[in-house]
Amino acid sequence: MTKTLLFYDEQFPYEGARPTKEWLEQLDDTIEVVGANQLEEALTDPSYSSYVHLHGPYFPKKAWPRLLAFFKKGKGLLHIGGAPFRNPVHLSEQGEWKIERAQTAYHRQLQIHEVLPVDPAPIVKLQADKKIPLLDGKEQLFSVEPTHNLILHVTKHKDRPEENGSSGPMDAHIYPLLKGMSKDEREVAAPAVLLENTKGDFAGGRWIMINQTIAESFWQKGGLEALMEWSDFVKKAVTEIWVKPNYAMYQPGDRATITIQIEEIRKQSANWQFELVVTKETEVVWTGRETITATDDLQFLQVPIDVAIEKGQYLIECLATSESGEKRIFTQGFWGNDPHLLQEGTVMEAGRDYFMKDGRPFPIVGQTYMTSDVARKFIFMPNVAVWDQDMATMKEAGINLIRTGLWTGWRHQMFIDGHPSEDVLRAIDAFLLTAKKYDIEVTFNFFAFTPIAYEGENPYLDPRSVKAQKRFIRALVARHANTTNVQWDLINEPSMFDPNRIFQGPRSAHDRFEHTAFVEWLEERHVSISALQERWDTTTEELPDFASVSLPEQEEINFDIEDMKQPKKGLRWLDYTLFTMDMHNKWAKELSDTIKSLNPKQLVTVGQDEAMYSQRPTPFFYQEVVDYTTVHSWWLMDQLVWDGIFTKTPYKPNLIQETGMMYVETADSKAKRSEEELRNILERKYAYSFSTGGAGAVQWLWNTNFYMDNTNESNIGALRADGTQKPEADVSYDFGRFIGAIRDLFDERQLEDVAVIFPYSNDFSNRKFAFDATTALTRVLAYQMNVPFRAMGEYHLEALEEQPAKLVIVPSAHNFSKEAREKIVNYVKVSGATLLWTGPIGLDAYWEHSQPLTDELGDYHLSNVVREELLTIDGDEYPVSFGDRRIGEINKEVVLGQKDGSLIEVQLGEGTLLWSPLPVELNERTDVLTDLYRKALKHAAVEEDLRWIEGGNLPGIYGRKLSFRDGYLYTFVSEFVKDTTIKIQDAATEQVYQFTLKKERSVLFATDKQGRVKASYRDQNIMI
C-alpha cells in the first residue's frame, strides 16, 4: 500500500488558519505527518507516492533537493496556501526559522516560471469545474481570497527546430478546479488548479495547487476529508486520455468515427468506461458506451458513429469513469460541411480608412486565436467544441475578428509539394464554419518570418519555392473562394531573405536567384554602370560592370562614424534595402494574384511588426500589393502614436493587427508588471490604435501559449494558462461594447491638415536618423501640443495632390531623394501650402551635396554642428543642443550671408518654405521644436480641433478628436502619474466637456454633429 507524506510543522512559517493537532490526528493511516526536521529523510522513503504541502510559499530550503527528486519520480503533489515554493526557509544560528525573500529559482525547477498575484476584487463567488469535478460540492471550503496565476514553462524543446515560430512538446496540462466568477459570470481567477505531467522530467505527476490561503472554515466544513480525497487523487498518477473524431469536418452523408486513446503514464492498469453522446443543435443523435483497460502502453479504440452526417455542427460529450470512481468529461466536435452558411452575407471590403461589412462600417476589435487546449497545434489537433466555447465567449465580449493561421508546421499541411493534407484542410474548414456560426471575421495567416522554401534556394525569389507556396495557398483558398468571413494574410512579420537571420534587417541568402534579381534591378534603376560607380563610390576596377555586383553583408557596411578600422563602403546599402522592398512586393503580388484569381473580392494583407525602424518590408512600400496594411505594436512602448501614424498609408486601411505586452523582468528575475498594469498598457494601445486613424486593434493573444520554448509567450494572453480571464480581457469587452455601439460613426473621416514625410532614403541608408527624428517630432507635436497629423512616405507622394495638406514637414532627413524633394516643392508652389524642412536640404539619396533652390535660398554649404547651437525664430534665440555622439553624426547647412542658425522663410510659388538649417528633431531640447511647430502651424493656418481649458499643459496627457460625416470620436490617454481633470472645448460645436482621466487609463466618447454624447468607453461620465 502506498502512502502520502504530509508536511506540517507548528513552528514553521505558515499563512492562513492552521490545522489543530486534533484535526491532524483524524487523518487515516495512509497519511503520515512529518515536521521540518524530518522531511528531508522522509522523502527518501519509496513507500510515499504523494506529498501534501500545507505551508504555502514556505518550505525547508535544506529539503529542496529531495523534494525535487521526489517530484521527478512522477509522484503526486497537493499544495495548499498561496504561491508554491516561493520562499525558502532555513534555520538561523539561533535555531529560529528564517524566511528568505521571495524567489523564482525553486518553482522554476518545477516548470513554473513565475507566479503573479491575482486581485480577488472582481470575484463574487467560487465555482467548481464540471469537467474535472474534484471540487464539485466543496466550494464552501473556500472564501474569496487573493490568489495567484502560474506562468508555466513546460515546453523546453521545439517540434521543428528550424522554424522560429515552432511549438513544442506538450509535457504538461493545466486545468482550473475552482474558478472565481465575476458578477457577469466571467471566469476571472482559478484559486485551485490541476497540473498533469504527461511527459518529461515529471511524467506521471499529478499536482493539485491551491494557490490561496485557507481560513478556519476550511477545517471546520470538511477540509480534512477533502484533503484525504485529494491526496488519494494525486497519488494515482496521470492517465492521459484523448477523445477525437477522425476529421473535424465531414461531407453530408459521411459517417464519423471517434477515436479514444488512453495511456497510464506510470506502470499501472485500470479499467475505464466511456459514455459518449453526440448532439446536433442540442438534439441527441447518437449514444454509445465503451470500456478500455488502460495500461502504460498507449491504447486506441475506434468507435464508428452510425449516423449519416447532415450539414451543421455536431458536439461530442464523453464521460470517462475509472474503476476507482474518478470522473472526467471530454468534449469534442465536428462539422457537416455547410457551404451555404459560409457564403451568407458579403465579404469584408476595404475603404480608405476603415473596413465595411454587409453595407456598414466595420471597425475591428479583434483577437489572435490558436485555442486554449493545444495552442499552435490547433489545426493539426482540432477540437471543434473548444473552438465553439471560446468563440462564443469572444462573441459575447464584442470581438468581431480573429486572426489565426500557421506560424509553424507547414510541412504538416503539405508535406510533399503539391500534395496537401486533407485532414488539415478539413480542420481549417471546420474552424471557419465555427467562426461563421458566431459571425466572426477570420484573417488566416499562411507563412511566418520567411515563407517555406520547400526544395528551393531562396524563399522569395526561387521560382520553385514560389510555385510551391502558390500550390500551398491555392489548396486552401480554392475551398473557400466563396466564403464570406475570411481574408488572407500572406506572411507574418517578414524578413528578407535569409531564413536563419530574421528580424535583422536585410540579410542576403547569397543564391543565384537573388544575385540575378539584384543585378537586373540595379540596371533598371541606374541604367549605366558609370552612374552606379559614382553613386556607390567605386572604381572601374572594383565594379567593371553590373554582373560584378556582389550581395552585401551588414558587416561590410560602415553604419557608424567610428566604424573605420577597416575600409568599408556603405552607399550601396540604400539600393540593397530598396531592392528587398521591391522583391518582397514582387513575391507578395504573385501570391496575392493566386488568391485574387479565385475571388478578387477577398482581402489580402501582410502582417508586419514595427519593421519601419529595422529596414524590413514596411507598409508604405508593400501597400501597393495588398488591400490593407498592418502594424504589430509590441516593443516601442513610448512610440505608440508613431506606430499608428507612420504605418497608415493614404489610400488603404491600417490595422493594428497584433498588439500586446512583452514580458519584462526585474533584476531579480521577477515579473516587472502586475496584471492590472498590463491591462492599462493594453487599453492605451487600443485607444491609440483608433486615435491615429487605424481601422481597429487585434490583441495577441486570446489564450496564453505555453507550449513553446519561450517564456515571453508563456506570459502573453488575455487568458491565463489555466483558462481564466486576466484583467486585460476587460479591454476586449469594454472596447467591444463601445466600438460596437458606435460602429456606424466610422465613415468619411476628415483628414489631418498636417502631413509629415517619412525620409526613407535616410532610413534605408548606412547612417539612419529617420526613426529618431520622426519619433521626436511625434512626441512634441502629437503629445505635448496635441496636434494631429498624418504621414506619407518619401517614395510614395502620389496622394499629396489628391489629399492636400496645409502644412508639410520633412524632419531632419539629411539624405533625401531628389525626385521626392522636387515633388514636394512643386506641390507647395502650386497648392499654396507651407513646407517646414529641418536639417540639410541639399543632400540627395546617396549623400551627394548640391544646392537646390539657390534662387530662393542663395549660396549654402554643408557643415558640422557644434554642441550648442542657436536657432532664431522671429528674433528670438532658442538653444539647440546636440549631445553625446550627435556632434559627430549629423550635419547642418550654413547659408552665406545669413546669421548661423536662423529660421529662413521664403516664398515657393504660391506657398512658403520654412527652413531650419539645423536638424532640430535630433537635438536634446523640445522648447525649440514646440515654438518652431507653432510658427509653422500658424503660418499654414492650421486650426485647432480642441481648446484645452484644463489638463492640456500636463505631461503625458494625450487628446485627439476624429471628425466623421455624422459625428466625432474623442480619445484621451494618460501616461501621467495621477488622476487628472480634463476640460476641453470643441472648436466646431463650441461644446465644453469635462471628465476625470485616471492615471494610466483612457477615456473615449462619441458625439453627434451637434456635440451630444452618444456613447462613452466603459460608460464613463462625460459632463457637458
Image: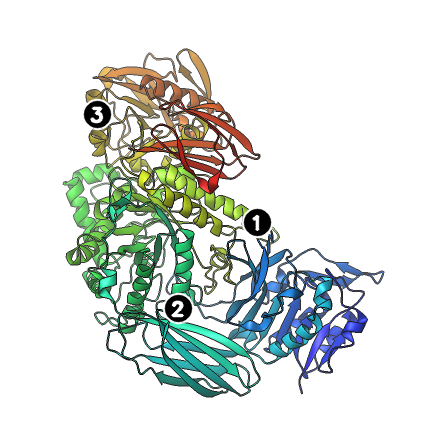
Q: Secondary structure at mark 1?
A: loop
**Distance from the alpha carbon under mark 2 to that under mark 3:** 58 Å
Q: Position of residue 453 (x, y in %)?
A: 27, 63
Q: Is residue 448 above or below residue 1021?
A: below
Q: Is residue 524 left or right of residue 775?
A: left
Residue farthest to the front?
283
Name the residue rendered at 35%, 45% in the picture.
696
Q: Callout 1, which amino acid?
A: Lys
Quadrant in the picture for residue 563: top left
Closer to the camera in the image, 730 or 600 = 730
What is the three-letter code of the residue carrying label 2? Answer: Ala
- Labels 1 and 2 touching (C-beta < 8 A): no
Q: Position of residue 703 (x, y in %)?
A: 45, 59
Q: Position of 892 compared to 734: left or right?
A: left
Q: Residue at x 85, y 60 (%)?
A: 94
Q: Residue at coordinates 44% horizontally, 28% vertically from top-left?
A: 923
Is residue 430 in view from this perspective?
yes
Examine the rendered structure and indicate whether residue 680 appears above or below residue 893.
Answer: below
Q: Which residue is mark 1?
A: 672
Task: Give the residue at mark 3.
Answer: 827
User: Percent from the top left, x then y, of residue 168?
Assistant: 44, 68
Question: Which is nearer the eye, 139 or 112?
Answer: 139
The quarter in which the N terminus is drawn is: bottom right
| Helix, strand or loop at mark 3 | helix
Q: Residues within 10 Å of mark 3 (few under 14, many from 20)?
A: many
Q: CA distance from mark 1 to mark 2?
A: 36 Å
Q: Position of residue 954 (x, y in %)?
A: 52, 27
SS for callout 2: helix
